[in-house]
Amino acid sequence: MTTISEAITTIKKAENDADKLIEDTKQKSSEKIEESRIKSKEIIEKSKEEAMSEAEKMLLEAENNAKKEATHISNKTAEKIDLSSKTAMSKVEEASDLVVKSIL
């Protein structure tokens, strides 16, 4: 009879150990899931910050390029205006000479 009693005790202990192991595993699993959630949130936030930083750099670069292009266009336009003014002034002198000659 003692052997059966010992066997039952051993089986009960094994069941209790198995229940404890299952409970510990569930607890560790929950902890791992929570850690993963926290890590994923951190990764997402870091990625957002990096994306925003990169977007700001790109925007600044685009603005600088636009300013350079605007300056270039402005300089070209000023050159053309200056050339047109010089050409027009030479024509004015020529026209005034013709007017004077035709009056005289």
Image (tube, rainbow, N blue to C red):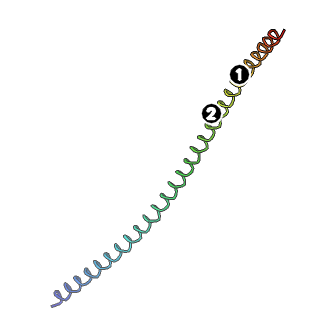
Foreground mark, 1 or 2, reads 1
Amino acid bearing label 1: Ser
> Could you tell me which secondary element the residue under label 2 belongs to?
helix
Q: Left or right of 71: which side holds 2?
A: left
Q: Residues within 10 Å of mark 1 (few under 14, many from 20)?
A: few
Q: State the separation of the CA atoms marked 1 and 2.
A: 22 Å
Which secondary structure lies at badge 1?
helix
Residue picked out by circle 2: 69
Quarter of the image for residue 62 reads top right
Residue at (45, 61) in percent of width and height: 40
Front-lying residue, 85 or 10: 85
Q: Which kind of residue does numbered mark 2 sit on?
A: Glu
Q: Position of residue 76 (x, y in %)?
A: 67, 26
Mark positioned earlier in the residue sequence (1 or 2) = 2
Q: Residue furthest front?
A: 103
Q: Residue placed at 34% from the left, 72% from the top?
A: 25
**Near-viewer residue (4 or 104):** 104
Position of residue 12 measured from the top left corner of the image (x, y, whole percent)? 24, 84
User: Does 86 appear above or below 37?
Assistant: above
> Where is 73 relative to 96, above or below?
below
Left or right, 41 with reference to 102? left
Question: In this rendering, would 47 be left or right of 91?
Answer: left
Query: Pointers 1 and 2 in contact (CB under 8 A)?
Result: no
Q: Which residue is mark 1?
A: 84
Q: Report x, y in % for residue 30.
A: 39, 72
Q: Residues within 10 Å of mark 2 (few under 14, many from 20)?
A: few
* Left or right placement of residue 56 versus residue 100 in this view: left
